[in-house]
Image: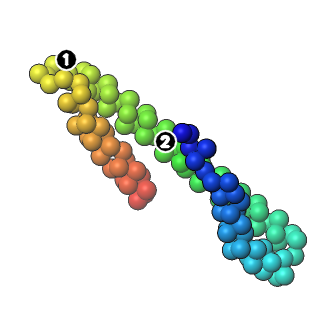
Amino acid sequence: MSLLSSVQSGAVEKVIADQQQYLDPVRQFILDHFGQNGLYAAYVLAAILAGLLLYKLVKFSFELIFLVAVPSALAAFILSRFLPYNFWYLLPITTALFTLGLVIRVVGFSKG
């Protein structure tokens, strides 16, 4: 049974309608106080914030791949050739070390 077949009929419409009850008063407030141009500005601001969030998520995903996944797999492979441990034993250790390095890099650069 697929995920789409298990979704109840009208569930998506119900979620949208539930969210709409919170967004309609905000929309009306903006229209009353700032007019149609204020509503356009709010839409642009929401789109910019959504784009910024998407950019940050994509950037973090690539950092995670290129600064953690690839180097840890490469280090585990190289270490498995020189140490008596196999690749699958070393992979969690190298992943933890490279993840710690990424955390230190992110925290260290955010302070300055």
Q: Position of residue 104 (x, y in %)?
A: 33, 50
Identify the residue shown where x is 53% and y is 48%: 57
**Considering the numbered disc 1 on the image, is that residue within a helix, a strand or a loop?**
helix
Q: Position of residue 13 (x, y in %)?
A: 71, 59
**Considering the numbered disc 2 on the image, is that residue within a helix, a strand or a loop?**
helix
Between 79 and 12, the residue placed more toward the observer is 12
- Is residue 12 in view from this perspective? no
Residue receiving disc 2? 61
Residue 47's image quarter?
Answer: bottom right
Mark 1 crowdedness (10 Å alpha carbons): few <14, some 14-19, many ≥20: few
| Residue type at tag 2 | Ser
* In the image, residue 63 above or below residue 46: above
Q: Position of residue 65 (x, y in %)?
A: 43, 35
Which mark sits nearer the N-terminus, 1 or 2? 2
Mark 2 crowdedness (10 Å alpha carbons): few <14, some 14-19, many ≥20: few
Looking at the rendered image, the quarter that the C terminus falls into is bottom left
Identify the residue shown where x is 38% and y is 29%: 70
Looking at the rendered image, the quarter that the N terminus falls into is top right
Residue 107's image quarter?
Answer: bottom left
Residue receiving disc 1? 81
| Residue type at tag 1 | Arg
